Each structure stands twice: as structure tokens, then as C-alpha cells.
Amino acid sequence: MRKALALVAAAGLTAVFAMAALAAEPPVTPFPSPQVGDVFVAAQTATTDGAMSNFFKPGSSVVFRAYAVDGKTHKVLLAKDVKYFYVTIPGAANVKLTYDPKAPGATARMAWTGTWSVPASFAPGIVQFKVLVKADSKRRGQFVQFPVSTAQLTISNTPPPTLGPGPNASTAAPAAKLDLSLYVDTVNGTRPAAAAPRPVGCTQTNVYKRGEQLVVRAWGVDMATGDVLSADNIDTASATLAGLPTLPLNWGSHGATGGKVWFWTNAWQIPKDYPLGDATINVVFKTDGGKTGTFDYPITIIP
């Protein structure tokens, strides 16, 4: 009887520990939500010379660049397709985005741009901007930032230095229609193998020194269903960069405790002898149903 009670007690403890382990795991909360509404929107912040950054001084210029895809037609939105496309900034005037692939800071994919001249009196801190779009079809969409504080737009009187200029190579524009719409960016890793760590880890950048750690971040949407691309519907997700092993992207949680969201990431260590100049990271997602989405992301390697 005592042995039976001991076995029951042990089983009960096992169940308790299992439940505790499950409770410790963050819930799977895809960024920005399990489904995206009528219009997919992706946006980035950069300097006027195309260097991606999220830290800026008061008095400097922030370039917002973006693209959007209609959820019903799957069309990439051009100038003739929208009623409005703009950035809302708490405590500041809206920034209108205009379509021009050759504008300062623009890329062939992210061809909608607008520049915010940060007031000299603007209060330092994280700027929780949103990018809003309304298509001629009356469908709407918005973009918000990953909830990772070091990679969010921040105004600072003493920002970490921004490496630049950004890549000169123009990446290919997306197809006129997309089955899968993707967002891709990169941040500096906190564990570089052969270079000094940056003053602030995990800040957005597309310019890297040899020896640094490059972290790819991505999320996306199946335009037919509106479902965010996750481990539930993706067969493979990977990034390639010439001369380095193919990087499998991992689905996992990131951000502040209590506000974690799930997206795709992984990292390379840039070799000390990697070729200098512009290069392109090719990100590819393949769904369980056979659909493919790609994103060419330009970077620059400096000594």
C-alpha cells in the first residue's frame, strides 16, 4: 500500500513539474498577430545614405521606407493604388510616404519613403511609430515595430555610432503579385567572434565589420489566408549569403518578458577575411503547401 501511495505521489509530482514547465514556456504569439488584416505592410528606418539604423539624435533626419501588399489581390501597392500611406509619430506631425525607388534611403522593394526631421527639442526615448496605408480598394493595413527595445526607433542625445554609408547595390523589386509577403532586417549580434561588441547590442544595421555577428530577423504572411508564417505552416525558412553556409531560420520568442512575440531568426559570424563591399542576403520561405516567398536584403561589409 505504501509503495502504491509512493508511486501515486511520484506520478503527481511528475505532473506538477510538467505543468510548471509548460507554464514557464511563453505562449506562441506570432508577430504582429496570428493573422494580418486587409493589407500587409513592412517598414524600416534608415539614414539618408541608406544605412539602416534605429538610433538618431535630435535634429537629425530619419528616413522611413516601406512597401505594402493588398490582401485580396496580392498586388504590391504602387502610387496609383493608394489613397494614403503615412507614418504616425507620437508628439510629432505625420510623415507622408511617396513612391520613388530612387529616393534617398529607398530600395527597389521598399520604394515608399518619407523623411522626418527630428525636432531639436524632441524628448529622448523610444518612438512608437506606426505606418498606416489605405488602398484604393478601401482595404487598410498598418506596421508596428518588433517589441525589442534595442531595435526600436530611439531618439538619443548620445546615440551609438551608425556605420555607413548603406549598400549601393539595388535589390530586385518584388513581383507584381506575391503569394507570400515578407519583412526582413538585420541587427548586430551581441557575441561577435572576431570583433569588438558594439556599444548597444541588437540594434538595426545593414553595415557590418568583418568579424561581427549578423542576426537575420524575419516574419511574413500567406496572402491567400492571412496567416502569419509560423512553424505550423512553413516547411523551410532559410537565408543565404555568398561564401557562408546556408542559414536555417528558427521560429522562436523574442522581446521583453510579458510581451514576447514569435518571429524567425538566426545568426552568422562574418569571417575576418570576408570580401569587402556590398552583398545580398537571400531569404526564402517555403510553405507546407508548396508556396515560395523571397526577399533580397542588401548589406555592406567594411574592414
Image (cartoon, rainbow, N blue to C red):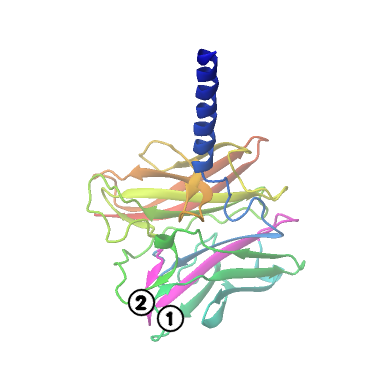
Name above or below for residue 126 compared with residue 298: below
Q: Are marks 2 and 1 in contact (CB under 8 Å)?
A: yes
Q: Residue at x 52, y 24 (%)?
A: 9
Decide whether residue 97 is among the magenta residues. Answer: no
Q: Specify the amino acid type for callout 1.
A: Val
Badge 2 marks a residue whose secondary structure is loop
Q: Quadrant of residue 81?
A: bottom right
Decide whether residue 62 is among the magenta residues. Answer: yes
Residue 168 visible? The answer is: no
Q: Residue at x 46, y 42 (%)?
A: 239
Q: Residue furthest front?
A: 1
- Name the residue that disc number 2 marks: 57
Instruction: Return the disc, 2 or 1, that comes first in the chain's sequence.
Output: 2
Percent of width and height locating residue 168: 40, 61
Q: Which quadrant of the rendered structure holds the N terminus? A: top right
Q: Residue furthest right?
A: 137
Residue range (magenta): 52-76
- Name the residue that disc number 1 marks: 118
Name above or below for residue 22 compared with residue 161: above
